[in-house]
Image (cartoon, helix red, strand yellow):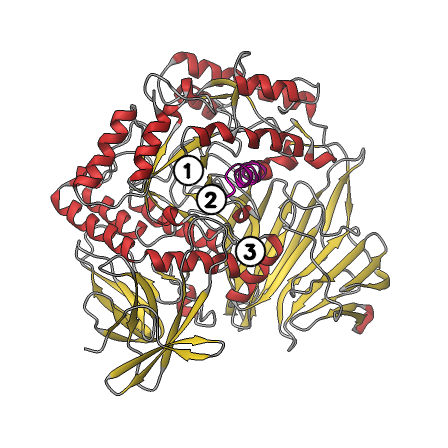
Amino acid sequence: MDGRDLVRSMSVGGSGRAAQRLRTVRAAWRRRRIDAAGLPPRGAERARVPGRVRSAEPGPGGGLIRFSRSELRITVTAGGAVFWGWDGAGPEPSYALAAAPEPDPRAVLEPDKDGGWRVVAERVTVVVSRHGALEVCTPGGVVLRRELPPRWWEPAGGGAARWTQRSEVAADARFFGLGGRACGPRLRDGAYRLWNTDPGRAFGPGDDPLYVTMPVQLVVADAATHLTFHDTTWDGTVSLREGEEGAGSGHDRAGRCELRVDGGPLRCWVMVGTPARVLLMWAALTGAPALPPAWALGHQHARRFGGEQEVRRIVAGYQERGLPLDAVHLGTDHHDAHQVFTVDRERFPKLPVLAEELRRDGIRLVSIVGPAVRAVPGGAVYDGGSALDAFVRDGAGRTVRGEVRAGESVFPDFTHARVRKWWGGLYEERLEQGFAGFRHDMNEPTSLSAFGETTLPRSARHVVEGRGGDHREAHNVYALCMAGAGYEALRELSPRERPFLLSRSGWAGMQRYGGTWSGDVATGWPGLRASLSLVLGLGLCGVPYSGPDVGGCDGSPSPELYLRWFQLGAYLPLFRTHAARGAGRREPWEFGAEVLEHARAALLERRRLLPYFVTLAHLARRTGAPYARPLWWGAPEDRALRDCEDAFLLGDQLLVAPVLGPGTGRRAVRLPRGRWYDTVTEEAFEGPGQVFLDTSLSRIPVLARAGAVLPVRGADGGLELEVWAPARGWTGGGLVVRDVGDGWDEAEIERYAARRQGRRVVVTREREDGVAEPPHPVRVRGLG
């Protein structure tokens, strides 16, 4: 325990209560003792490299290449994704994959020059040198990524091996992804840790790691975009260094990536193509994003509620001021002594009645659910889990105990199928209370600690689907498995409604079960900027549905900061206002009449755009494409767009340029190619290039692409097509998916085309049997 640990031990707990501080100190020492006894000593290690190539054996989609000290298995799937695994490792078992991928029967393993081999497929070629280096190339032979021969260190007495993989990319390439990162979305030179972490305080752009880390990189270069996924759940670090063209003596300096991981296996996936194609392949591999119910695309509000009457008072405040509200989130304060799957009967004596009242007004209740179970005999959850032997144990067979707000607690082992089934059944109690959605919190998992890591001991034992392992391997997928337990149970318990599930932590494939939110982002302008980075970065890792705590988690935002955050949130997939205990209020009327007026306008615009958000949600499920996309999404070859981080595309049709700093009356907006209309003034601008737009407090700049066909809510509440006039000589169009309710019916995709005829714009619906008149009212804008 060093000086920093001692300072932290005196300040932890938040409430100032000495008893809780003392418990977190005891918990920290207990974790250290468990790890000292349970973790194997590292001791002597043997360094290994593949050696020289010896032989090769063709197989489905590729084959097996044998080296003097290892084997390399390469497979190209039918969808075009490339897999390789060292020491003969295959794609499974994996927590990331949704199903076993089918190999591409057309991919061929054949000899290459200098004694190497290569696998040739339709969209990619993988070249393997005689020493084990791999090159991922386009069909034209352009090298997108070069993986140097890996190195790994095996403990002399057996156990998990540490390994290192160094890679090179094009000098012009830019890195994105790695989960939810507060800096970015473009990842600059530096080290990024792969260990899901509750920072224990409000975070800003300089804090890393955070709640959702993934070994998923999206690399954008002139030649092509590619996604790389190293399928290992162990703790690790990714070190990035961007390349430089014409560096030094005039030669390009390649971009570098070094991955160091504490455990294997050594296996990797690569997908090559346009950004849209890459995310489509990723969704096919790891699972289609869950489709949220339509109400979850509206405005949601969360805070510390003192009881049922305060919930009614806040809801009435929204209704009296004409502010749309679609969901209310209850935190642990509605639990009995903060214990999961319980209700405080004094403050919430008739919770099902309250839920039904709200539902009649179109408002759903969302419940917080944490994994920690208070370790007190007599509690239904604790007793049920104990009888099932559901809780994580240490190496000596004792139940591992941690510290949370409810007190000393135990943690279910979600890597056990039987435990997931038991836990999922507990959601029936939540549904009976009237809850329509769920928010998983503290599921990194977090155990409060005065010093050291705020999670379970690394030596804690897990079932890991029967293979057996410890927390070093299970930590990063703990929340993923918990989300799977909740999602699958809700599908059974409430089969007519799509589940709504948010998870603060997660891993590759978490989109199968729902979305996530920012966690405790700091109140301040840097926190506002970090909010946008998180949403865009997660979308590029295949998680399209996410959003921040509007206004920040801690402190009291200024009226200007709150309004700018609110205006940004109105255009993000998850639109939720929230603050932590003890922070300032987040209701729009708390910030004065001017803020209330402009916040109402943002809320009404969100309500007007709900049909567009519904369309984006359905398209995300079918294609993996995020709702919020970087400006370079449709033109990754545009280097100026790659470096633009203060604006984004909402689908293909809108460009949103939020205000991310104080006192901004005008801001620069970089435009992709084509004509763009200011949606307020209808003034037209030509891209590519940069324009300057007004950013008075009443608005943030939003532009529509010329030719866009947008589904919006009309004045009568019905669906209307808002069409932005194509430029002369050009055509446009758009897709519309009308939600058919919150069930599982497959919705039809409607396709529309727009073309210019003099001063008229003609809009038609494209069907398999020809074209037809649109079945919805059409409003044309941008004609002057």
| First in residue order: circle 1 vs circle 3 | 3
**Above or below: residue 401 compared with residue 440:** above
The residue indicated by pointer 3 is: 217
Numbered badge on residue 6? none
Amino acid type of the residue that numbered disc 2 sits on in the rendered structure: Glu
* Residue 498 among magenta residues: yes
Which segment is the magenta one?
480-499
* Residue 126 among magenta residues: no
> For this view, does 738 lie left or right of residue 375?
left
Q: Residue extending furthest left?
A: 593
SS under mark 2 = loop
Amino acid type of the residue that numbered disc 1 sits on in the rendered structure: Ala
> For this view, does 45 lie left or right of residue 146?
right
| First in residue order: circle 2 vs circle 1 | 1
Mark 1 vs mark 3: in front = 1
Residue lying at 46% horizontally and 13% vertically, measured from the top left: 22
How packed mark 3 is, by other alpha carbons closer than 10 Å (few <14, some 14-19, many 20 or more), is: many
> For this view, does 201 lie left or right of residue 448?
left
> What secondary structure is the stretch in magenta mostly built from?
helix
Residue lying at 68% horizontally and 20% vertically, measured from the top left: 37
Q: Nearer the viewer, residue 386 or 219?
A: 386
Estimate the x, y position of residue 471 in percent, counting from the top left: 63, 32
Q: Nearer the viewer, residue 597 or 754?
A: 754
The residue indicated by pointer 1 is: 436
SS under mark 1 = loop
